Image: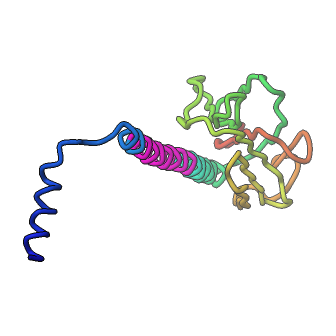
Amino acid sequence: MRTNNLLNQKNGLCHNKHGLTLVELIIVMGLLVLVVFAAYSFFGASGNFFQKNSDKADAQSQSSLILQTLKIDIGVAKSIKIIDRNPGAVVLVSTGEVAYYVDESNIFNKIGDSGSGNTFHGMPIEGLSISFTPEGGNVLKVEIEATNLKPLETDFFVPNITEFGPGGITTSGIVGDTIIITTEIGN
């Protein structure tokens, strides 16, 4: 008898022709919208996080590349001029000189005597600034700052320059944002 009742109940469910009510459909649709919205929010936040970290990694990479580029030319410098460039001012170099500075577009520039324009093909870094400070003798301090980046600071030893002043590191102030390096003797 018991088995018979279970079969009848089971068969009764299978033969129910009523379907879903409008209220049940609205509840299911609401739950589905919530799940889709939660998934969209999660992927949107993940994309923003990835972009922010990607920008930070790009800035760190560019800053390291800037320091490596400076290290090469500073290592062979015969003289170094540090100037505080006015915004928008054109930097002119003579034969045998190379200038480094950050322009108004937040792009690091390396200008050589060939007049070819920027030979450092970097990308804009938000809030990029660079400063050059003579530390006395033949040591040059370089600081790089940018938005979303811990400041990078390093001291460069300039083996060919033995003093601060004429013939060595000259500056128009204590700190400058542009450096002009002479790599050839006699300039």
How many marks on residues? Answer: 0
Residue 46 placed where, x, y %?
49, 50
Question: Which of the pair 93/100 is nearer the observer?
Answer: 100
Whether residue 43 is in magenta: the answer is: yes
Quadrant assignment, res 87: top right
Answer with left or right where residue 37 lies relative to residue 172: left
Residue 181 placed where, x, y %?
70, 42
The answer to whether residue 85 is visible is yes
Kindly identify the residue that appears in the image at 91 percent across and 47 percent down. Answer: 174
Magenta stretch in the rendered image: 29-53
Q: Is residue 184 above or below residue 111?
A: below
Whether residue 17 is in magenta: the answer is: no
For the C terminus, the image quarter is: top right
Residue 52 placed where, x, y %?
57, 47
Answer with left or right where residue 58 lies relative to residue 107: left
Answer with left or right where residue 36 lies relative to residue 62: left
Extreme-front residue of the structure: 1
For the N terminus, the image quarter is: bottom left
Kindly identify the residue that appears in the image at 64 percent across and 55 percent down. Answer: 75
Extreme-right residue of the structure: 173
- What's the image's color scheme? rainbow
Question: Which of the pair 41/90 is nearer the observer?
Answer: 41
Q: Main secondary structure of the magenta part?
A: helix
Kindly identify the residue that appears in the image at 64 percent across and 34 percent down. Answer: 107
The answer to whether residue 65 is visible is no
Q: Is residue 92 above or below residue 27?
A: above
Q: Is residue 33 above or below residue 168?
A: above
Question: Which of the pair 14/139 is nearer the observer?
Answer: 14
Residue 130 placed where, x, y %?
74, 44
Kindly identify the residue that appears in the image at 90 percent across and 39 percent down. Answer: 172
Quadrant assignment, res 139: bottom right
Question: Which of the pair 4/22 is nearer the observer?
Answer: 4
